[in-house]
Amino acid sequence: MASRRDLKKKINQFILANVIDECIYLEEQNPELVHQCDKIIDEAVEFYNVMMTKINHAKSKADFREIHEKFEASANKFVDALNQINA
């Protein structure tokens, strides 16, 4: 199981480098997508804040397993949302 620090890095990298950067790129390429991208960015930031709070309060391996599973499911959701507006 990943350590607390590794899990935080993984979520940080995904949200900041992948989701938000992709949204900014899409907004620059097509200004009509601003509202859709802003919605995804807002959801990503909210997700990031919730996940960091959960990680900071996690005590057991089961807590970290649950956080990791939720992250994987949400990561797929964000990728699907980006693919949908990018199509």
Image: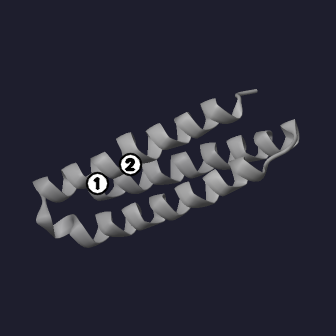
> Which residue of the protein is positioned furthest toward the bottom in this rendering?
35
Q: Amino acid at mark 2?
A: Val
Q: Seen in the image, is 47 located left or right of residue 55?
A: left
**Residue at 21% across / 65% down in the picture?**
33
Question: Which image quadrant for residue 24?
Answer: bottom left
**Residue 61 in view:** yes
Please tell me which residue lies in front, 56 or 85: 56
**Residue at 71% across / 29% down in the picture?**
3
| Circle 1/circle 2 CB separation < 8 Å | yes
Q: Which residue is mark 2?
A: 19
Q: Which residue is mark 1?
A: 23
Q: Is residue 29 above or below residue 6?
A: below
Q: Secondary structure at mark 2?
A: helix
- Give how far across and how far down residue 68 sits, in percent: 69, 41
Q: Secondary structure at mark 1?
A: helix
Residue 4 is labelled as none
